[in-house]
């Protein structure tokens, strides 16, 4: 995505609205692009194996020798 350069002035209101809309368009395009990409499979932590049952939870190894 191309970046643009604008000369602006809040004091004289030079290009303030144009820059605002340009930034908003860029954000919208980036969000649409990231939403359209397939999400990679995530690794989920701190979840018990559903098939292991309570016995597996009781066999956790202690951290740091505690």
Image (tube, rainbow, N blue to C red):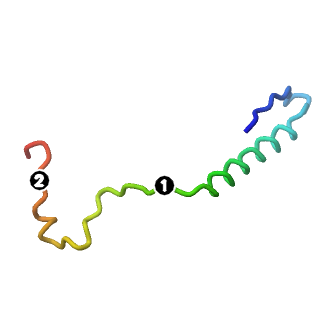
The disc placed on residue 13 is none
Across and down, in percent, residue 39 comes to: 52, 56
User: Is 60 placed left or right of 31 in the picture?
Assistant: left
Residue 65, above or below 32: above
Residue visible at 13% across and 58% down in the picture: 60
Element carrying mark 1: loop
**Disc 1 and disc 2 in contact, CB within 8 angstroms:** no
Q: In terms of depth relative to the viewer, which is nearer, 63 or 30? A: 30
Element carrying mark 2: loop
Q: Which residue is mark 2?
A: 61
Residue visible at 86% across and 28% down in the picture: 9
Residue visible at 23% across and 73% down in the picture: 51
The residue most toward the left is 65
Across and down, in percent, residue 61 comes to: 11, 53
Q: Which residue is mark 1?
A: 40
Across and down, in percent, residue 35 comes to: 63, 57
User: Is 57 placed left or right of 14 in the picture?
Assistant: left
């Amino acid at each position: 995505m191309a970046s643009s350069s604008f000369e602006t002035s809040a004091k004289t209101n030079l290009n303030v609205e144009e820059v605002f809309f340009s930034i908003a368009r860029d954000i919208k395009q980036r969000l649409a692009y990231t939403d359209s990409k397939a999400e990679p499979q995530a690794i989920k932590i701190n979840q018990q194996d559903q098939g292991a049952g309570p016995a597996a939870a009781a066999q956790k190894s202690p951290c740091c020798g505690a």
